[in-house]
Amino acid sequence: MIKMVMAQFFLIVVASFLFLPVPASASDLEIGKQFYQDQGCVRCHTRDGKGGKFGPDLLNTQKNRDREWLTAFLKDPKKTLPGAKMMAVKGTDAQIEALVSYLLSEK
Ligand code: HEC
């Protein structure tokens, strides 16, 4: 009897690990952050006090821009901001979406 109870308990523990919800937004932020680093955005931009000064500080991006604007800008800066000097970001839609999530996050 006690063995049955323990087996059931064990199964419940294993099952709850399997069905633990994966926080999609958190991993999206991680992908975006990694992409930001891989693309060398820091050469021109500061975000947490470190980085280049050629482009504007991106720490407060989420206060000034929305998802739609950022996505359009990163894909085609000149079209979104006439006279822009920044080059278009090369990446898949998913990578750019994750990058925008990262830019819209507080840090
Ligand atoms: C060669 C330098 C350079 C690199 C590398 C660069 N940027 Fe920029 N970025 C700029 C400049 C300069 C601007 C200001 C607008 C312009 O002239 O293009 C800008 C503007 C921006 C803006 C608009 C800010 C605003 O609110 O007006 C965002 C967002 C941005 N960059 C994100 C990125 C991201 C993300 C990356 C990496 C994928 C990146 N930049 C890489 C130079 C750069």
Image (cartoon, rainbow, N blue to C red):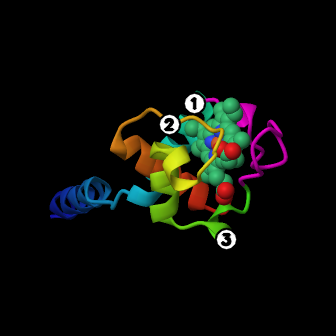
Q: Is mark 2 within 8 Å of ligand 1?
A: yes
Residue at the (51%, 37%) spot, across then down? 88
Give the residue pinned by disc 3: 63
Residue 102 lies left or right of residue 46; in this view the side is left
* Amino acid bearing label 3: Lys
Mark on residue 89? Answer: 2
Nearer to the camera, 28 or 96: 96
The quadrant of the rendering that contains the C terminus is bottom right
Q: Secondary structure at mark 3?
A: helix
Q: Which residues are magenta?
A: 40-58
Mark 1 Cβ and ligand 1 under 8 Å apart: yes
Q: Are marks 2 and 1 in contact (CB under 8 Å)?
A: yes
Image coordinates of residue 3 in percent, x first then y, are: 19, 57
Residue 29 seen in the current view: no
Identify the mark nearer the N-term, 2 or 1.
1
Instruction: Please tell me which residue lies in front, 19 or 9.
Output: 19
Q: Which residue is mark 1?
A: 39
Quarter of the image where the N terminus is located: bottom left
Residue 40 horizontal side relative to residue 25, left or right: right
